[in-house]
Amino acid sequence: MMQLVCKKIFLIMLNLLLLDQDSILMILKLTRHWRIVSGIGLLNDGMILTSILRRKTPSDCTSFRLSFLWDQYADALSQLGFDYEVLAEQEGDAALGNGGLARLAACQMDSLATLDYPAWGYGLRYQYGLFRQIIVDGFQHEQPDFWLNFGNPWEIERVHVSYPVKFYGTVEEEVLNGKTCRVWIPAESVEAVAYDNPIPGYGTRNAINLRLWAAKPSDQYDMESYTTGDYINAIVNRQKAETISNVLYPDDRSYQGKELRLKQQYFFVSASLQDIIRRFKDLHNNFDEFPEKVALQINDTHPSIAIAEVMRVLVDEEHLDWSKAWGIACKIFSVTIHAVQPEALEKVPIDLLGSVLPRHLEIIYEINYCLMEELKKILGQDYDKLSRMSIIEEGAVKCIRMANLSLACCHTVNGVSRLHLETLKTRVFKDFYELWPQKFQFKTNGVTQRRWIVVSNPSLCSIISKWLGTEAWIRNVDLIAGLREYAEDPDLHAEWKNMKKVNKMRLAEYIETLTSVKVSLDAMFDVQIKRIHEYKRQLLNILGIIHRYDCIKNMDESDKRRVVPRVCIIGGKAAPGYEVAKKIIKLCHVVADKVNIDPDVGDLLKVVFIPDYNVSVAELVIPGTDLSQHLSTAGHEASGTGCMKFLMNGSLLLATADGSAVEIAEEIGAANMFLFGAKVDEVPALREKGTSLKGSLQFARVVRMVRDGHFGFKDYFKSLCDTVEEGKDFYLLGSDFASYLEAQAAADRAFVDQEKWTQMSILSTAGSGKFSSDRTIEEYAEQSWGIEPCKCPF
Ligand code: 9GP
């Protein structure tokens, strides 16, 4: 996924106040489309978009207001005999991404459009998005999410915008104008066809485009088979071409070198760059101007092959000399790293790259040669360091380190929170940081208040606007801090509590429909929703629930009266091949099965697993949450954006000092959240010490309960329990357990005092301004891309 910022502005004009039913329908399509998740980038020529939306001469140019549109749309639909809410439910999510990375991109697209930046997003139009999670007997099963089954009305197919993308073949030498050149003779060609997904800004007539590429067979494809009479094979191979954009890899963390994955990355990068360069060349003929007109943001390491592709185009096709081309590449690219774990940094085996993209491999070798020469001048004979910084990783399987390729070229390298940047500087890219400290920056992630408050929590939206006396915060979210002034006002408290109750009611109904579990609205709704991963420590949460259950079981009636009732809600998908994560899901179910029917427990504790967690589910769950949990072992979550959505919705956070939670604590005050666990600099020593079960009796007891089959499936959970044994507890569940329980107890105490809780909740929302993607995008625009807002002049 890649972001591209076009500094030369071709503004799309949207005149949105068109009141006939068709227009309203179209606009609503666009607003709902905010949910699209995928890669990103920027640029536009928007003619189709403009012509579709401008069906009538606009009668007025007032700004675009969601509530206004909803009402109009609902009216229009009811006249046709349809209920808006019922109809809206029919629309599934475009699950074009895996988790945090893609959801962040969706927020950033909204901010780019709203803030009038001239920007486009690029991604792949996967036929099968992230799998649908089905739970059978507590086990996760994966089903394909064929989200395009009934078409996608929000997209515009641009049949005439298509580019050939080439693969395989050989590289030969040619003499051109007396100069020897390397020329790639590809063996396969696949057509990339554009599908545009307009993203309208809020309160502006600007809209930007998310252009997704679909693979189609090319007419040039496998000409040899046709000419040699192998007609059937030629047809079969044509069909294979389409598989490139068929399916999203469902693992959000470990990337093994796979041919299809590399082909997807190059397909996406090549088509996007052809699109960008074609547009540039329509108006300019001198590549010296390219960096003034175009900025490209590489979103994680997946699209890093774009660097080699730009070099290939500039050197082989545009015949620029190497150093000039490299100078241009270094000016246009910046990168954001979203991961901490080394396995999430893309690596491609050299043999694979050499077969699929032979010319790119040569180019990467050349880049690496230049890098090594430069580094030798600075580092001398420090071969250890040189080999760590090399783009080529030696070893049993020789690989290209895509991250190092990006670091060598990009003018800025961004972390996604302050703590994450520290990790990049001191651990992941230490050598590069020592050499080029000026490249390293961070832009704390943010989410869009327009989706995560205005759309998903309309009652909260009204309360905020009422108390601030303005709706301006929807575009300028810093204003939300004005709520602090009323944090103790009893009238606001009453409205706030009522809003929360209504949202909890909706959530309770949803839970009952889905799981048949009835939950009490007086209970604290305690939520952890995110991808299931060991480092996110859903296991810590479940072991905490077992501890709570165990305590309740051992209480007499008078003690029970002092227990704060809880509904513990967990949701998330495990990567299909990730056995430990799948066992965590099963454990959650067996605990729920036992607890939920235990008459000794009743409403004091309910456990719910919400299947098929996605953005639509989050929109329902987050507004109804009292307490949300963010439990990653310190130093493992690059940022985390779920916590920001909860924060905006006035949920209190129970969190480790990890990722952006550290900055959240600074904004709202640590006293307004429940922080626990080892700090990032304490983690190595704790790992070294290796105590887990011995460190906490309570921890040893709950693990023993699972091991002994208290919840059944004794053999099945053995390997899960082994992961937290003495010396093996890499994610430090054992050493953080006592502190986790203390934080949970503090949350219980706070909940008893509902006025205090409401005040903390208001202060959470009031302190969420910094965590808007508007701020993040403004920082990117200023510090990385050098662009300014470009308001539609009409
Ligand atoms: O794991 C990070 C998450 O912490 C961050 O909030 C998100 C957006 O920056 O990116 C996630 N990373 C990925 O999904 C893959 O690197």
Image (cartoon, rainbow, N blue to C red):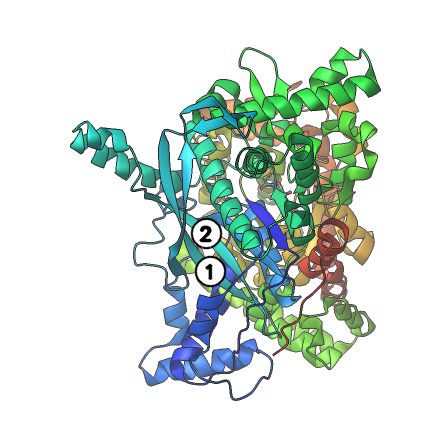
What residue sits right under mark 2 in the picture?
212
Position of 324 relative to 668 (above/below): above
Q: Residue furthest front?
A: 178
Q: Residue at x 64, y 64 (%)?
A: 449
Residue 247 pos. (x, y %): 39, 41
Residue 3 pos. (x, y %): 60, 49
Please state if 411 lies on the left or on the right of 641 as rendered: right
Q: Residue furthest bottom?
A: 59
Residue 360 pos. (x, y %): 53, 28
Nearer to the camera, 570 or 82: 82
> Mark 2 falls on what kind of element?
strand
N-terminal label among 1 and 2: 1
Task: Judge whether residue 75 can be spotted in this image.
Answer: yes
Task: Judge whether residue 524 can be spotted in this image.
Answer: no
Mark 1 lies within 8 Å of ligand 1 (Cβ measured): no
Please state if 501 lies on the left or on the right of 683 as rendered: left
Packing grade of label 1 (10 A; few <14, some 14-19, many >=20) is many
